[in-house]
Image (spheres, rainbow, N blue to C red):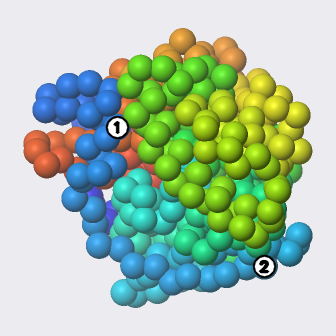
Amino acid sequence: MSSTPHKPASSGTSPARVAAAVEATVELLYRAPLWLPNRHVQTIVPSLFARRPAVSFRRERWDTPDGDFIDLDWVAHDTPPTETAPLFVLFHGLEGSSSSHYAVALMAAAREYGWHGVVPHFRSCSGPLNRLPRFYHLADSNEVDWILRRLRAAHRGPVVAAGVSLGGNVLLRWLGERQHDAVQVVAAAAAISTPIDVHAGGRALSQGFGLVYTRSFLKTLKHKANQKLEQFPGLFDRDAMLASRTMYEFDNVVTAPLHGFRNTDDYWSTATTRPLLPHIQVPTLVLNARNDPFLPAEALPSRHEVSAAVELYQPEHGGHAGFMTGPFPGRIDWLSRRVFGYLERHIDHG
């Protein structure tokens, strides 16, 4: 990927400028490689087998207002960015971290652009178990609010934010709830492979091949839940937790009651961000592949369902947080180009 930031096309009409604009537009259109023929390989291969750029991080720990902690991983630079360079904040997905394939690729892009980059980990996702009788969840916009406002107060340059899957959902919820207040915190945002309709996404993961992804999530979630019961005996029903085979069942026993929801239906209804999209005022890219195995295409929003600040991009292929390109073994930098190109266009460099 070029280290030159993407610039908006000039208003001029010379042939060279028109050609450059067309080339930039074509580059941002996603086409899956022929050797990744379906939604599942487009999801699994990038996650498990993609060649990843070399990225290192510096970890910082913050104590939370409620007596817990989170860890933030800052991307390391050979030459530190200027104090006023943009800050790119990435919220990871369910059971993700700064080592997730998409996080590594996006943080490598932040480094190449000369931007500051940070991955705040949701509670329990940075390695050590968090202190309190809670974890993290799809509707945790208060956590995002606290993190972004603290970063905004400490940073002299523009702040932009992105979220992938669960992280994108929480970010969209924050943007839709805070509306104009969010404009004072971030200059632009991007949400990638977000489960905008959580009920539809939950059903997709509870049947057929979707259960393969569910089993992977539940393996680590149940391990953490067992650790949490060692901290807080009797916090929830261990047998019911261990017996859960779907996200619906696990959320009903663990996630929903630990975070103040009546049950899974209450939690998933609250967490669904589709009704909030008309209220977003920050320029926001919402990127979902129409073949995402975590969310059926019919659950995706149309142009008339979102605010003028929201740009929808729904390519036919890409899987869930995949978007791999090129011949085998492929590259995972298309998403970075698409996201950073969008964010760059909406930053005021003063």
Local packing at callout 2 (Cα closer than 10 Å; few below 14, some 14-19, many 20+) is: few
Q: Residue at x 11, y 45 (%)?
A: 328
Point out which mark residue 242 bears. Answer: none
Q: Amino acid at mark 2?
A: Asp
Q: Residue at x 10, y 42 (%)?
A: 327
Decide: is 46 above or below 318: below
Q: Nearer the viewer, residue 203 or 189?
A: 203
Give the percent coordinates (x, y) of residue 176: 78, 38
Q: Nearer the viewer, residue 25 or 228?
A: 228
Q: Residue at x 32, y 30 (%)?
A: 40
In this view of the protein, can residue 51 be seen by the observer?
yes
Give the percent coordinates (x, y) of residue 57: 46, 79
Of callouts 1 and 2, which one flags the residue occurring earlier in the amino acid sequence? 1
* Quadrant housing the C terminus: bottom right
Q: Residue at x 49, y 49 (%)?
A: 219
Give the percent coordinates (x, y) of residue 32: 24, 31
The residue labelled by disc 1 is 43
- Say which element carries label 1: helix
Q: Seen in the image, is 301 located left or right of residue 215?
A: right
Decide: is 33 above or below 17: above
Point out which mark residue 63 bears. Answer: 2
Local packing at callout 1 (Cα closer than 10 Å; few below 14, some 14-19, many 20+) is: many
- Say which element carries label 2: strand
Q: Are marks 1 and 2 in contact (CB under 8 Å)?
A: no
Q: Seen in the image, is 183 located left or right of residue 301?
A: right
Q: Amino acid at mark 1?
A: Thr
